[in-house]
Amino acid sequence: MKSQATVIGLISDTHGLVRPEVFEALQGVSQILHAGDVGPAEVLAELSAIAPVRAVYGNTDAPGRADLLERIEDVIDGVRIVVTHGHELGSPTPPKLVGAYPKADVIVYGHTHQQLITKAARRIVINPGAAGPRRFKLQPCVARLYIWQGKADVELVPLGIEAE
């Protein structure tokens, strides 16, 4: 599936830092979806050197920014995708997200900084993890979403060294 698929880069919680490893990890993607806590607008400009970027705002982003959306809802090659930061649900979990966005095939979120892939009932809930400054001893990470013939798959791409 991967060789013929549409490939989308998923990133979250950059908090103002674009790690150099992001450029290799997301090389060749058709677009990047950012799940919030972006930091300054320069982050999106830097990421746009890789591919076009769409981003939602997180709880640390200033509301009302023209370059950040509340939520992204899109259909790409027959797959319904929702991108949200997740903070609107308090502490986001896959069951809460599926309940909030029942028509989505793929739900991308951030906020917790914990990379996670949950696949159930032909749905994927993905948190690409935090790509910015390391917090909570979690390894920085992004993800690649593959869409082909109405089906989706995803893989996590760790950035840099293993967490200490």
Image (cartoon, helix red, strand yellow):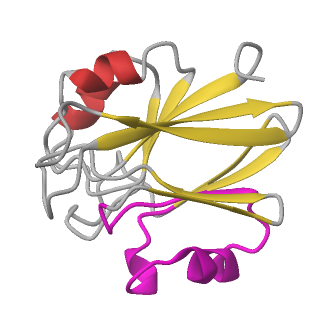
Residue at the limit of the structure toward the bottom, as seen here: 90
Residue 86 is inside the magenta segment: yes
Q: Residue at x 58, y 74 (%)?
A: 94
User: x and y percent of residue 61 in the render?
Assistant: 22, 61
User: Which portion, as a residue range, is magenta?
Assistant: 84-113
- Relative horizontal placement of residue 90, taking residue 1 as reference (left or right): left
Residue drawn at x 87%, y 39% is 150
Which of the 4 quarters of the picture holds residue 119?
A: bottom right
Q: Dividing the image into 4 quarters, which one contains the N terminus?
A: top right
Residue 163 left/right relative to 95: left
Identified at 82% across, 58% down, the residue is 122
Relative to 126, is 148 on the left or the right? Answer: right
In the image, residue 34 sits, relative to residue 62, either above or below, namely above
Indicate the quadrant where residue 22 lies: top left
Q: Residue at x 89, y 31 (%)?
A: 149
In this rendered view, identify the residue nearer to me: 47 or 136.
136
In the image, is residue 24 above or below residue 114? above
Q: Which residue occupies the foreground of this view, 162 or 99?
A: 162
Residue placed most toward the observer, 64 or 92 = 92
* Marker count (numbered): 0
Q: Is residue 27 above or below residue 101?
A: above
| Residue 17 on image: x %, y % | 14, 39
Q: Is residue 65 left or right of residue 86?
A: left
27 lies above or below 115? above
Q: Position of residue 34 (x, y in %)?
A: 41, 45
Q: Percent position (x, y) of residue 87?
A: 37, 76
Residue 79 lies in magenta, yes or no?
A: no
